[in-house]
Amino acid sequence: MSIAEHLTKHSGGARALQRTTRLSPMFAFVVLNACLSLAVFLSFVLAVDTWSGPVVAISFLVLVNAIWISGGAATAILGLFTRPAQRQNLPASWQPTDTTAILITLCREDPAPVVDYLSDLTKGIARTGLHKSTQVFILSDTSGENAVRREEAALSPLVHAGLIRYRRRTQNTGHKPGNIADWLTAHGDRFDHMLVMDADSKMTASCIRDMIWRMEQAPNTGLLQAGIALVPGRSLFGKYQRTASRLLSRNFGRGFGAWSGKTANYWGHNAIIRVQAFRTAARLPQLPGNAPFGGAILSHDFVEAAWMRRAGWDIEMAPDIQGSAEDAPQTLAAFFRRDRRWCQGNLQHLRILCQPGLHPLSRFHLITGIFSYIAAPIWLLLVVFLSFGTVSVSGYASVFLVGAVLLTPKICALADNLPRARTRHRRLVIIKAAAFELIVSALVAPLILLRHATSVVSILLGQDCGWKSGRTPLFQLPDGWIEGALGLAVLGFAATHGVADTIWLAPIFLPLLIAPLFVPMLNRRVP
């Protein structure tokens, strides 16, 4: 019996929560979020020594960020008390009646890993009988004579064997969304579904078969997003990301799927989409004005999901599906480069929020994407005000409460994973992995906060990172040394205003202080 089941059996409160999640998961999410965020906010209010106009404004910012962090905790709690949906098993002899195009997008990536994956995938497709109803397309936006020659040479054997179809555009209008839209114009009429993958995506043939089957069982589903695991890491940072994904994703994904229901989201790849539904979102609007806020929409996936939902199609999650994965950045520098583009794309959504006809939950997804970056400068402002003594606080209840809210998804993940471990050895492995993930996430979180804040500032100042433009943001922070200097500055300012402020800011300045040591360690390759 799992911890969740035990609590449900012996606790009246847990039974009430389970009844609530059955009746309305979204209502349970809202109630949990409101309770947690109000507790964090009140603990801060009670800790303030002296009130003034700036302190009132800061307390409002604290409330906004409390709502943000409480959303993750509420989702995790909901996932713990949400039972997986009962689904009919896929019959062993089943074969699709619909046709599916598997679209893999490339743009200057190393083609060798893609070829290795495609060799395995096409064998699996033949083995499961999917070759009769599926076709693999490589949609390339690669430019540059040497890169094109290398890509064509690598893919040529698969093309000549008739296992894939390869098309490279010479005009990369609209980037990835434009590439897929062009394919839709040329080939869309021949297919019922398209399964979208990136160059670093991995999906097994059995996973694809399961996705197609689910789409055939649900004719009103426009998009089905698979949960995405991570392939084994090649650095300590890559290992950390995979550990976090394996520990947290299952329970968190179940909670997210529960409250989002038929208005879930799209992550841009590892999803199957009904062609008829995608036609409503194939040509996204160009935002007026210049980048970074104008031009092509960078974070197009959220918008495509919102457009399809507006047209009446269901957007659903499949967090339980097996065989869906992707690679992850193996260094902090690579992680931050990708994250910088996501930041710009998500902030562009500020101009889309008021589009007419969007489902309220679609707007909520856009807001959460925006706030995943806006939260950082808000936290940073609070750090600055505490460091300079603008806000004077006493007591540590709020610090501990914020920590408890941030730890809730990790605790829920343990409550979900440990009961399923059948041996003592396996439980020890899970506990060791959770301890590793907790330590690294506590050290990395202030760096991510700082990078998010500088990314937001650089975008507000008009710097465009574009699609793989190679441009770097303002305020470069290489190798952890500038983070260390900032950590020392925060410690110095906080120490001048007393022990209370120093303890409040310790979770920020301590990881920054040791960044010059652990950043190179995280980037180091591991066996």
Image (cartoon, rainbow, N blue to C red):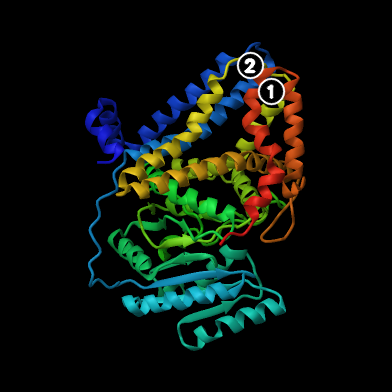
Q: Identify the residue shown where x is 55% and y is 41%.
A: 439
Q: Is label 1 in contact with label 2 (beta carbons under 8 Å)? A: yes
| Residue 3 locus on image (x, y percent) | 30, 37
The image position of residue 185, as x and y in percent, is 51, 72
Query: Would you say 389 lies left or right of 196 here?
Result: right
Q: Which residue is mark 2?
A: 393
- Viewer-nearest residue: 191 or 267: 267
**329 shown above or below 368:** below
Name the quadrant containing residue 466: bottom right
Question: Which amino acid lies under the numbered mark 1 shown in the image of this protein?
Answer: Leu
Q: Can you identify the residue that label 1 sits on?
A: 386
Question: In the picture shown, does residue 18 fall above or below 471?
Answer: above
Which residue is at 60% across, 77% downward? 168
Q: Sequence-wise, which precedes: disc 1 or disc 2?
A: 1
Q: Residues within 10 Å of mark 2 (few under 14, many from 20)?
A: many
Q: Is residue 451 above or below residue 341?
A: above
Q: Position of residue 16 (x, y in %)?
A: 27, 29
